[in-house]
Image (cartoon, rainbow, N blue to C red):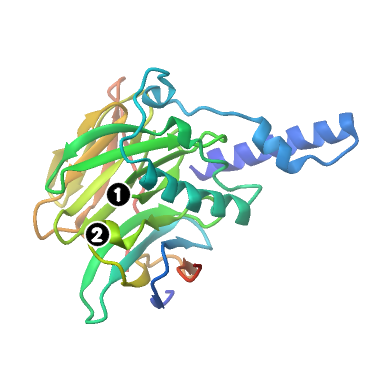
């Protein structure tokens, strides 16, 4: 992910520099908005996809995404495209959750349950981006978005490996009652070619 | 290690690491110390953050927002909770 971001940043720099030479002006902000990158996520590129049933929650995350972009105009997630927000899956787990996603103009994928989430890239060595939401009534669940080359996602809890529900590029895994994010030892994307790509979870103190 | 921060609720809670990709947690809790909701994310502040949406999505209109550094490898964490 870091390498992908660095490459993207270099592309932005190169593109901006070229434009400056041609136009004789600095167009940094316009450069970012002029690029309309789409992530390799079919569910977000389907023009027939129905809009989300809870646009307010998408807008809440989108407002945050805009703040992050303003704070970091060169490296931030870009402008959210909430008009394309779509519900990838519904009726999930103990909370009967809906997993919703939208993209940004830089190709980041933003995803949430009830407005709780983040954005990330899926043009990465794993092809997945995810979060863990924990609530009193719904317990803990792993949820995220996978690139088109991903076939399924596994969640490892110690010696136990479970398959996440996987549909429309989204994935969801309800942790057993009493377990939380600290019990997750690995989240692994299995690609269509059979290769497995574990997300590099950090050492936690 | 960064320390946890306690900030009164406004309308969102963002958390991230400022010194590299690492695991952080944005938390809504009550004044009695019990928790309401938390979201864990692996991110860097320059790119994206862990975001908890409105607390009334979880049945509460006023909660305490906290952030937690759950990484043993990174030290600088940012917790943005104070904007109206």
Chain assignment, label 1: A
Residue A189 location, quadrant: top left
Residue A43 location, quadrant: top left
The answer to whether residue A4 shows anywhere in this view is: yes
Instruction: Please state if A122 lies on the left or on the right of A25 as rendered.
Output: left
Instruction: Please state if A142 lies on the left or on the right of B71 as rendered.
Output: left
Q: Which residue is mark 2?
A: B58
Residue at (27, 43) in percent of width and height: A143
Rounded to the nearest angstrom, the CA distance separating label 2 from label 1 is 9 Å
Question: Few, some or many C-alpha atoms within 10 Å of disc 2 (few <14, some 14-19, many ≥20)?
Answer: some
Q: How many numbered badges does the structure rendering display? A: 2
In the depicted view, which residue is nearer to us: A169 or B60?
B60
Q: Which residue is mark 1?
A: A114
In the depicted view, which residue is nearer to us: A161 or A27?
A27
Q: Are marks 2 and 1 in contact (CB under 8 Å)?
A: yes
- Residue A116, compared with residue B84, is above or below; it is above
Find residue A75 and report its horizontal and vertical position in percent: 61, 47
Chain assignment, label 2: B
């Amino acid at each position: 992910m870091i390498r992908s971001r660095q490459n993207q940043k270099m592309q932005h720099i190169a593109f901006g520099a070229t434009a400056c030479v041609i136009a004789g002006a600095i167009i940094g902000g316009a450069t970012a908005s002029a690029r309309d990158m789409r992530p390799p996520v079919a569910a977000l590129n389907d023009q027939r996809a129905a809009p989300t049933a809870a646009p307010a929650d998408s807008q809440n995350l989108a407002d945050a995404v805009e703040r992050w972009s303003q704070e970091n105009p060169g490296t931030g997630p870009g402008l959210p495209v909430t008009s394309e927000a779509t519900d990838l899956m519904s009726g999930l787990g103990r909370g009967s959750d809906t997993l919703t996603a939208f993209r940004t103009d830089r190709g980041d994928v933003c995803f949430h349950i009830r407005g709780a989430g983040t954005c990330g890239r899926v043009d990465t060595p794993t092809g997945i981006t995810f979060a863990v939401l924990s609530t009193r009534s719904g317990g803990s669940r792993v949820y995220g978005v996978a690139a088109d080359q991903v076939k399924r996602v596994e969640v490892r809890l110690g010696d136990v490996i479970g398959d996440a529900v996987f549909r429309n590029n989204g994935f969801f895994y309800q942790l057993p009652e009493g377990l939380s994010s600290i019990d997750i030892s690995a989240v692994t994307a299995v690609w269509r070619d059979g290769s497995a790509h574990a997300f590099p979870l950090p050492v936690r103190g | 290690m960064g320390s946890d921060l306690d900030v009164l609720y406004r309308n969102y809670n963002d958390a991230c690491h400022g010194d590299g990709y690492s695991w952080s947690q944005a938390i809504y809790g009550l004044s009695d110390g019990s928790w309401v909701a938390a979201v864990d994310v692996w991110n860097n502040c320059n790119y994206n953050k862990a975001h908890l949406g409105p607390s009334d999505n979880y049945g509460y209109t006023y909660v305490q927002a906290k952030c937690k550094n759950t990484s043993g490898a990174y030290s600088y964490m940012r917790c943005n909770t104070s904007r109206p």
